[in-house]
Amino acid sequence: MAKKPQQQPKKAPMRQRRRRKPTSEIGGLAPLVVVGLIGISMFKLAVAGLLLIGLLPTFVLGITGRGEHKNYKLQCVAFANIAGVLPFVRQVWDHPRELMQTVIDPLVVVIMFGSAAIGYALIYVGPMVAAVVLQSLAQERLKTLSQQRTTLVEAWGPEVLGAAPSGDEPDWANKTPKRPQ
Amino acid sequence: MSGESAPVPPGQSAFGERYVVMTASPLPEFSTAGGEAFKVNDQQEPGRELYALVHNPLVPLRNDVYRSIKGRPIPNMVNPVDRGLMSIDKNGRKQRLVTIFERPVGGPLMGPDGKVNPRVNTNRLRQHVVLSVLKALAALHKRGIFHRNLKPSNMYFATKDGDEVWIGECYSTPPGFRQPFALEALDLALADDTARGAGSMDSDFYQFGVALQCLYFGEQLWQGRKRDAMVMARINQGSYWALSGGRDIPGALGSLIKGMMADEPDERWGAEDVLDWFDGVGKPKRTSLKAWTMNRPTNFKGVAYVDRRLLADAFAREPREAASFLKKLDFPSWAQLSFRDEILTERLEAVIDVRPAEGFSGARADDYKMVSRVCMFLHPTGPVHFRGHSMFLDGMGSMIADAFARDDRDLLAVITDMMDQKFMSALTEICGPRDPGFAQRLQDFKRLFHHGTSKSLGRGMERVLYEMNPILPCISPRFDNVWIGSIKQLMNALDRLSASGGGRNILLDRHVAAYCNTHGPDLSRDFNKLAAAQNDPGRFASLSAEFFGLLQRRFKMGALPHLTEKLVDSLGPVVKGLKNKKRRETVQQQLDKIKKGGDITRLTSDVNMLQVQAEDAREFGQARNLIHRIERERARLNRKILPTDPEARLKGIKGSRTLAFVVMVLVGFLTMFPG
């Protein structure tokens, strides 16, 4: 029995083959944070410790985050989280021995993790606000477009809309056919 | 008045008040196929004897004859005095070309009814008539004009009591047009009576001979004679004996007439022979019948033909039977046996191309042409015989004019079929050595082949008609009341026609198109455009305006208010069709201004509807595209934007990130610089 020639897998088109892999959504933030932490730890280990603990929500999100706009979300939470951690960084920088006291202080923890929560909240609220703003902008644009349309119709007549102008219908269209009795 | 026929201009006469044509007093003895003669009163010289010939627009004139004679009159001939357009009131008012002629008052030598003038007798014929006519003919021939309208009824006593004789005019009809068969020299007579061509001096002397013979016997010798019987009699017995019916004319007059009626042109008496005859030294000439005799008779349709001219004529009258006869024939053998003195070369045999019938096939498309080639071989100096018609190529102009006058579409189709380069080349080759003038006559006809076979507007047989008869007026039915002799007259007539509400789509009239193309500048492209726009009234109206504007400018014509108004009105739907409201208003204002001025050229220079239409259409397309884009955008913007929409989501998250960043920077700044 003659064997059927095996079909070779089709090669992907050249353009497709050469396409680069999509870049990681986290982007350059994670390495920057790691490098920053290492750099800080070389001067003040306590500050690095504070950051490691304080920015925990950001690290968790960086590791577990999925879905679209992950990078932007991460940046948003990170910026908010950093804003919550920064006031205590100065304190620990000046008094490194107070690291433990600061870390176990519930108020400090609430402020640091709460700021991250605010970041999460911003991610939730942002699109809502954007929708409202975009809707109002669209209304403005609609007004301009309607004006343009009216000007064109005035200059060129209703024909420019693509519809037959009223009153120009052929005679047969206005006649009602008589039914055979 | 019919709205589709151009009205006659009011009270127009090219002669001013000088000549008054008395339509109630016709002069049938001066009427011809080309026009009707009437008495005329000369207001400036009341005693002057004149007559007016009101021309028939459907018969071409001999303009060269008029131009030659008008300045330098011919002795012993009815000479034209003047010509011009006049409004003639006979069977309705019509504008016609009228030629004023000198009028011989002695009456015709033979009336139109065949009655001989009582003053005609043998002595007068011999002593005065011959000399008078000879004087006229010699003067005409000296100018290269052949009369071709010599007949006893076209010769007049100059005065009531004198002996001087004038021959009638020969300018109102083409040469030999509608002449009786007997009055034409044999070769010319075989052609149809509308296509006998220019002829020669010999043919004039032949006509002169027949006229004298008729006057001598006191009867119209052609009356009651059938053509076919007469052809046979003239060829077999000679024209002199055939016409006289065996009666001889004794004495010197008889020899003169016999000499002038010799059937062989080489043997026919000319002016010098007639003068010799006067001097009494003329030698009688004999007519030989040898040249055209076949070595053995050929039986065709039960008749045995010995003369090849007769056989050619018989073939020409019955082309279908001739075709089947020739196809059954072994042509080379028949030709060798019938024309032993002639060598039928293989090349000539191939050119004549008589192919035997194949199987049961019926008539072939080429059969008529085959018969025509054989006829030309049999009678090389005779006319072209084709599909039952016989014509000389220089007589095609008058034949086509007559076909149009009678609306004979069949004949026009025959002529169109003849316009075949290959066929004509074959005929030239066949008759070449015997009739060297054929090729020259063909040259004039051949240049029109591409027009004749074309269906385009401004070409076709109408174009051939006007090209071959440049003097012929435009014979469109819309101008049957007026005489259109030039583009200027055409435009003026159209202006009047427009005033009466006619002239719609006038440029689609094939006659008008052909006439404009023949007499105007090169307008073929314009007519092609017009023909292409036939189904688009708007574009057609714009092109018509452009066309008339071009003519008005080229011919430097004055205002044509009615035509302009008509054209502007016809542009109404075009203006209405303009999409842009502002442009529509502007163009309408411009048109209204032009309408008052009567200058069609401004329709193209100021408005140029075609350009306006194109611009409008282009801008309308752009406006529609813009509207489509606006509608798409509106549809997009009209829907409700939700936070889950990708755009809102992206922009929201980005905004949140920016806010977080700003807060971070602010907190960092306050932390670093608390003071």
Image (tube, coloured by chain):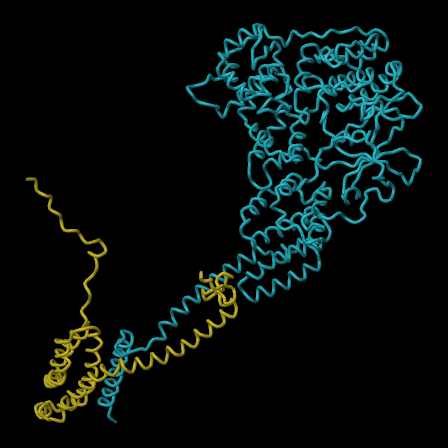
Chain colours: A yellow, B cyan
Dividing the image into 4 quarters, which one contains the C terminus of chain B?
Answer: bottom left
**Residue B541 in the image: x percent, y percent?**
59, 53
Is residue B23 left or right of A175 when viewed as pictured? right
Camera-side residue of B511 and A152: B511
Asked where in the image residue B486 lies, by quadrant, the reply is top right
Q: Residue at x 55, y 49 (%)?
A: B534
Q: Please say if B582 is above or below B35.
A: below
Residue lying at 83% horizontally and 11% vertically, measured from the top left: B253
Look at the picture and state if A149 lies above or below B151. below
Q: Is residue A147 left or right of residue B47?
A: left
* Of the pair B559 and A66, the residue shown nearer to us: B559
In this view, which residue lies farthest toward the left? A1
Q: Quadrant of residue B278?
A: top right
Residue B574, image x, y percentages: 57, 58
Q: Tell me: residue B271, above or below residue A90.
A: above
Where is residue A35? Give x, y as percent.
Answer: 15, 76
Residue B144 shows in this picture? no
**In which quarter of the view is residue B49 placed?**
top right
